[in-house]
Image (cartoon, rainbow, N blue to C red):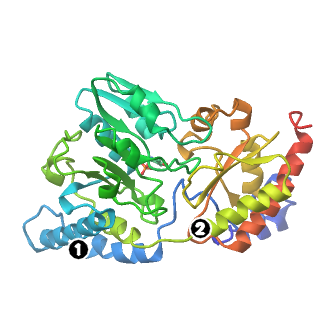
């Protein structure tokens, strides 16, 4: 549970004059529950504890020759080895970056080597927008399952396809993509593993990928740290130039506290499947005309995307937020945009259906009690909004 919002100022304020309805809504003490862990996560206590000394004591520049620099280098090397071990890689295959977006950019721009890039319609904008900068690229669609068919990928290959980029787990639906099968096509594969890490086992050797992107802030490390796995021998051109950091693959003074945090965060895991299943079952049972998008597909255990017929997802999101529940009506970066989610359109939902879907993503700190309270709030909010909705009869 997150701390209640501060309502103390309401007391003195209300003594002076009666609070307006808006002020009551804003100032009423609300317990806040976070169901948006695919957007970002709080830094965990153990991660914070592990990284703090690197700000104040071991603060050296890892490239400096003196004691401070060497101490920082040692911590960086240890973190790199831990990250590598947990991914099934070797340390020199890990390039630390600022996060998932940079890892995806580096992989696609740095490894497509002037050839054609093949990707899917459900990728994160960090992949799709980057692909759009290439001279040659195309997308394979996924169908209602939210899982790409490797045969469709095979059929879409071109003689000059130099890289395939398919995410390991989708951020909106949670669907897991058949990376091992895609690798068998024999073209180097990049996988955006930002939403898979910490939720399902990830071993880059078993997957067989050439490149794999991860991000710290989705798993309890702070924003601003991520990594790209680059298989030994895979050709990668740097996209950022300066010093000879990261074996000349990514220039810039290394973020040692971030690297320590990423390594520490990767060591812990929180079970969410029972909570996700409880949420889905209770919603489907207690609220009519609800559907779990891509329900039958293999999915990461913390994510569910549910459609509430006749509801505008942003209206529901705001109603839930006023009751203290944080959820998402699409990928965080595209929230506020009037366009429905490209992922939901890609699985064949109409624009209206896509705009009536909510993503719930669970994580550390969520409890059975919170899930039950969420279901209760959902039932009340959905019933209320449907009464007002001309689209729902
Ligand atoms: N890829 C996926 C699948 C994501 O979900 C996200 C973040 O939402 C990113 C990439 C971008 O990662 P970052 O926020 O670390 O840049």
Say left or right for 203 vs 172: left
Say left or right for 39 vs 205: right
Mark 2 = which residue? Answer: 272
Where residue 392 sits: x, y (%)? Answer: 88, 37
Q: Tell me what residue is drawn at x 36 percent, y 50 percent.
A: 213
Q: Tell me what residue is drawn at x 30 percent, y 65 percent.
A: 83
Residue 58, which numbered label? 1
Where residue 12 sits: x, y (%)? Answer: 77, 69
Image quarter (top left, top right, bottom left or bottom right) of the C terminus: top right
Q: Crowding near pointer 2: few (<14 within 10 Å), some, many (20+)?
A: many
Image label count: 2
Picture quarter containing residue 8? bottom right
Picture quarter containing residue 77? bottom left
Residue 49 vs residue 292, the one in the foreground: 292
Say left or right for 386 vs 179: right
Q: Is residue 22 above or below residue 32?
A: above
């Amino acid at each position: 549970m997150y701390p209640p919002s501060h309502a103390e100022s309401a007391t003195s304020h209300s003594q002076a004059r009666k609070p307006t309805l808006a002020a009551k809504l804003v100032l009423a003490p609300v317990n806040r529950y976070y169901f948006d862990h695919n957007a970002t996560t709080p830094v965990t206590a153990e991660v914070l504890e592990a990284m703090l000394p690197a700000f104040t004591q071991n603060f050296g520049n890892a490239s400096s020759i003196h004691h401070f620099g060497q101490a920082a280098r040692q911590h960086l090397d240890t973190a790199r080895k831990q990250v590598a071990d947990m991914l099934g890689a070797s340390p020199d295959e890990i390039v630390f970056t600022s996060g998932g977006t940079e890892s995806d950019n580096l992989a696609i721009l740095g490894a497509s080597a002037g050839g054609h890039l093949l990707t899917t319609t459900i990728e994160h904008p960090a992949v799709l927008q980057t692909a759009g900068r290439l001279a040659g690229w195309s997308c394979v669609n996924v169908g209602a399952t939210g899982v790409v068919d490797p045969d469709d990928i095979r059929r879409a290959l071109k003689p000059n396809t130099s890289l395939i980029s398919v995410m390991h787990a989708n951020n909106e639906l949670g669907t897991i993509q058949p990376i091992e099968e895609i690798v068998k096509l024999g073209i180097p594969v990049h996988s955006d593993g930002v939403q898979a890490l910490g939720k399902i086992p990830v071993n880059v050797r078993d997957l067989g990928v050439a490149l794999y992107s991860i991000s710290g802030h989705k798993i309890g490390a702070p924003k601003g740290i991520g990594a790209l796995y680059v298989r030994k021998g895979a050709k990668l051109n740097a996209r950022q130039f300066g010093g000879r950091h990261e074996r000349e693959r990514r220039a810039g003074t290394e973020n040692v506290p971030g690297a320590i945090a990423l390594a520490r965060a990767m060591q812990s895991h929180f079970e969410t499947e029972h909570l996700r299943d409880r949420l889905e079952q209770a919603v489907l049972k207690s609220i009519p005309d609800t559907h779990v998008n891509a329900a039958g597909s293999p999915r990461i255990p913390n994510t569910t995307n549910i459609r509430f017929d006749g509801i505008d997802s942003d209206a529901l999101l705001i109603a839930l937020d006023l009751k203290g529940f944080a959820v998402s009506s699409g990928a965080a970066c595209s929230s506020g945009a009037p366009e429905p989610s490209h992922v939901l359109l890609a699985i064949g939902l109409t624009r209206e259906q896509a705009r009536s879907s909510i993503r719930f993503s669970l994580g550390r700190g969520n409890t059975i009690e919170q899930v039950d309270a969420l279901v209760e709030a959902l039932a009340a909010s959905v019933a209320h909004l449907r009464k007002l909705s001309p689209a729902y009869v």
